[in-house]
Image (tube, grey):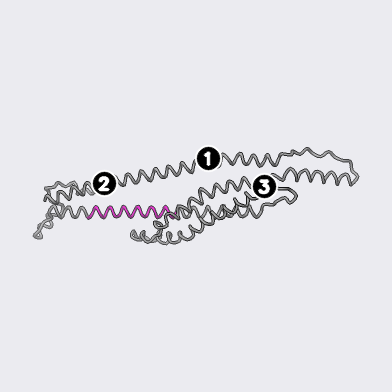
Amino acid sequence: MSSELNVPMGSPAPGASERASDGGGMDYRDWVRRSYLELVSSNHHSVQALSWRKLYLSRAKLKASSRTSALLSGFAMVAMVEVQLEMQYSYPPVLLVAFSVCTTVLVAVHLFALLISTCILPNVEAVSNIHNLNSVSESPHERMHYFIELAWGFSTALGILLFLAEVVLLCWIKFLPVDSGGARKVTACCTTTADAGAAPTTPPPVSRNSGWQAALASTIIMVPVGVIFVVFAVHFYRSLVGHKTERHHQEIEELHKIKVQLDGHERGLQTV
């Protein structure tokens, strides 16, 4: 509210002396009407500021989801292509199926988020670069709000969890054949030395559980990391929702105060 609303009810509004010289004066009714128009215009600018803030937030979410999705999906594809499976080792079928499913779902989730960001972001960028307050209504960020939140959630929450699971499965696939491969190499070395007529050498001691222990260690490290990530995501989401709720309560209180003040002016206008 402007300082003009603090003018007493019986006093003329500012500018009455100038208009009185023209043969007329600004009475209380004209002053209330002008104050109401100023209030509505200021409220309109605040609504536009809120819309622009939502537009910039949507643009930031789309940019973050597109970068994260492109990066993690690329890593997942490289891991699936570059992994070298030992043909002589009998992998557990569950491990191979889990790795295949996790990689496929990971790439699909990130590509879906990347698709949403690629389709919506150019329209939002085109409006955000226009220096006109009224152009915010041309942006599709309000109508596509649910798709933007879906892309952001897929890219940052579900996609990162799948990537952590991908790392664990990749460690199991890489480290499990280590024991059997090392035993075969030691046996072949001893056989070649014996065939050459040299004195047999004692093979170095090889731990039969080294690969399994390495894979288990990576799993033990990754499980607390995943739990911490989930707890942080839930806490961050609740804090964000709480902040939005407080902002909505403050806006409702401000609107209520404006309504009370306008009702008081309307009653004063009717009295006059």
Q: Secondary structure at mark 2?
A: helix
Callouts 2 and 1 close, C-beta under 8 Å: no
Where does residue 89 sit, x and y in percent of width and height? 73, 48
Amino acid, disc 1: Ile
Q: Secondary structure at mark 3?
A: helix
Label 1 Cα crowd, 10 Å radius (few <14 / some 14-19 / many 20+): few
- Between label 3 and label 1, give the one nearer the viewer: 3
Q: Where on the picture, by quarter, is residue 243?
A: top left
Residue segment shown in magenta: 37-59
Q: Which SS type dominates the magenta stretch?
A: helix
Amino acid, disc 3: Ile
Where does residue 205 sit, x and y in percent of width and height? 78, 37
In the rendered structure, which disc, 3 or 2, sits on the residue that comes first in sequence?
A: 3
Where does residue 254 sit, x and y in percent of width and height? 28, 46
List the residue tagged with mark 1: 228
Q: Is residue 90 magenta?
A: no
Amino acid, disc 2: His
Residue 256 is tagged as: 2
Quick one: which residue is furthest to the front in this view? 93
Q: Is residue 105 above or below residue 135?
A: above
At x 67%, y 47%, the residue is: 173
At x 45%, y 61%, the residue is: 122
Where does residue 2 sit, x and y in percent of width and height? 23, 49
List the residue tagged with mark 3: 173
How many tags in the picture?
A: 3
